[in-house]
Amino acid sequence: MKIDRSITAFLIYIVGCIITPPVGYSQANRSLCAAYKGRFDLAVALDGRLPDDYSAKELDLIRTQFSVLTHANCMKMYHIQRREDVFDFEQADAFVAFAAANKQKVLGHCLIWAKDVRTPAWFFENRGNPPTRELLLERMRTHIETVVTHYRGKVPYWDVVNEALADDENFIRPSTYLSVIGDDFIANAFENAHAADPNAMLIYNDYNLFFTNKQKKLEQLLRYFKDREVPAHAIGIQGHFELDKIPYEDLEATINLIKSYGLKMVVSELDIDVVLRSKWWAENGKYREELAKYMILPGFETSV
């Protein structure tokens, strides 16, 4: 928690220095989401329980600077449905209620993560054997329908399928979803979510979509959506960048590709590494205290 908040605070400061402040942003009214209102929403990803796990200053930052909230974990399947047909909405309900009380929207993350990790083990089991296609499709439908219906009218955006495109030469990454159902598990997930809440914006989310190999697979996925009339409305681009190596031209090409298929684009994750993440983890985050010196965002605690 503390590491994530430190990195987030530093990122907000850096981005604040890079982006030209919009009309309406002033020292007297330091609300970025208000200044950009009408152009795009500004969101923040959180973790832990709201408001209990946050200080008063952190809560003030969350309430005043962002118009959309998303939670890193509490709306994922392994948290909400640890056991079959036993749904635990307690933490997610508190999160959604916090947003509603502060007139903020919620982006639900995520209904189906196309990796076998972060999915409860029972989901892929059938009395010691893999589930049948019919059983796995039914489990998907039940989970998506239950969760989306529970939040219908309260959660306007959903990451429906997360990180399904392969990093190698394959189209879709290997998973139990793929091996048991086939690549149409993606279409089924979107169809189920749309049936549960026809008014929600449904998002496909992935990383490295600006790299050539992933960009080609994204185009294949967009064709698939179009040919099957899949109710997908937006593509979430995860932006994991290094400070001096942001691929602007590749990003522009990906955004134009998404636009050409009539879908919207969401910057679903954004972090800009000052210290390479591989170096950070290899050296056990020893740069924490040094980075904290530069966290001068007003009102935010810089201690780590």
Image (spheres, helix red, strand yellow):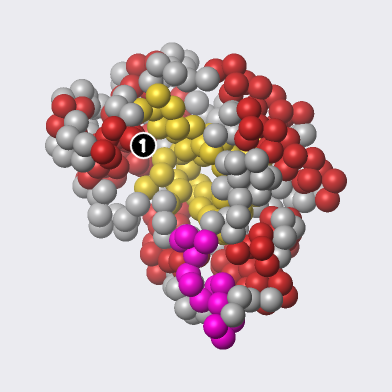
Tell me if I can see residue 193 in this picture.
no
Answer with left or right where residue 156 lies relative to residue 291: right
Q: Residue at x 47, y 38 (%)?
A: 269
Q: Quadrant of the C terminus?
A: top left
Majority secondary structure in the magenta region: loop
Residue at horizontal 54%, vertical 38%?
207
Residue 97 location, quadrant = bottom left
Name the foreground residue: 91 vs 269.
269
In percent of the image, x 63 and y 27: which residue is there? 212
Instruction: Give the number of callouts.
Output: 1
The kind of residue tagged 1 is: Thr
Q: Position of residue 262 (x, y in %)?
A: 76, 34
Establish if 286 lies above or below 20: below
Residue 141 position within the rendered picture, expressed as x and y whole percent measured from the top left = 67, 69
Q: How many residues crowd around disc 1 within 10 Å: few (fewer than 14), some, or many (20 or more)?
A: some
Residue on which disc 1 sits: 64
Side (left or right) of 208 relative to 100: right
Residue 279, compared with residue 63, is above or below; it is above
Assess whether residue 126 is covered by the magenta stretch: yes
State the extent of the magenta-drawn residues as a range: 116-128
Residue at image coords 64%, 32% = 213
Q: Nearer the viewer, residue 123 or 102?
A: 123
Q: Give how far across and how far down residue 188 sits, in percent.
A: 72, 61
Q: Quadrant of residue 124?
A: bottom right
**Near-viewer residue (26 or 179):** 179
